[in-house]
Amino acid sequence: MKRLLLSLTACMLLMEAHAQLSLENFNGPGMPAGWTMINADNNTVNSSAFAAPMPTVLTAQAWMKRLRATGDSAMLTVSNFSPAGTSDRWLVTPSFMVNDPNMVLKWEDWESA
């Protein structure tokens, strides 16, 4: 009986830990609540970094939302500036607690040639 109660309690705790997890896919309007953009370089994006028209929002903002496919958006930034400069742009998540040793933080990165 003790094992059954212990197993049920462990399952409930695991379910609680997984319920606290969230997935951010950037598909909603605007920036997700609690996320912060920092543009510390103030560089001008090189117009050749994008096919026309170039999104000038990346000169004023550190990151921009980009539609990858229907219902699938991502955040992107650049490090191709004119004149050349060092990128110093950040997308900061809200704080979160890692309370399960099996939790995974996944980041997709893509670099154009």
Image: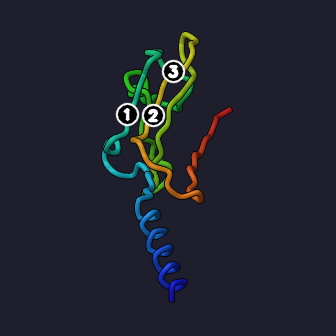
Mark 3 to mark 2 CA distance (whole Å) = 10 Å
Label 1 Cα crowd, 10 Å radius (few <14 / some 14-19 / many 20+):
some
| Element carrying mark 3 | loop
| Residue 20, quarter of picture | bottom left
Q: Which residue lies furthest to the bottom in this view?
A: 1
Residue that numbered label 3 is attached to: 88
Q: Which residue lies furthest to the right in this view?
A: 113
Residue that numbered label 1 is attached to: 36
Label 3 Cα crowd, 10 Å radius (few <14 / some 14-19 / many 20+):
some
Q: Which residue is drawn at 48% across and 30% down?
A: 52
Residue type pointed to by label 2: Leu
Residue that numbered label 2 is attached to: 91
Mark 1 to mark 2 CA distance (whole Å) = 6 Å
| Marks 3 and 1 in Cβ contact (< 8 Å) | no
Q: Which residue is drawn at 56% across and 56% down?
A: 103
| Marks 1 and 2 in Cβ contact (< 8 Å) | yes
Label 2 Cα crowd, 10 Å radius (few <14 / some 14-19 / many 20+):
some
The image shows residue 97 at horizontal and vertical percentages of 45, 49
Instruction: Please tell me whether residue 5 is drawn above or below residue 54 in the rendered image.
Output: below
| Residue 3, quarter of picture | bottom right
| Element carrying mark 1 | strand
Residue type pointed to by label 3: Asp
Instruction: Please tell me whether residue 111 is drawn above or below residue 41 in the rendered image.
Output: below
Instruction: Please tell me whether residue 21 is drawn above or below residue 49 in the rendered image.
Output: below
Which one is earlier in the sequence, the residue at label 1 or at label 2?
1
Q: Residue at x 64, y 36 (%)?
A: 111
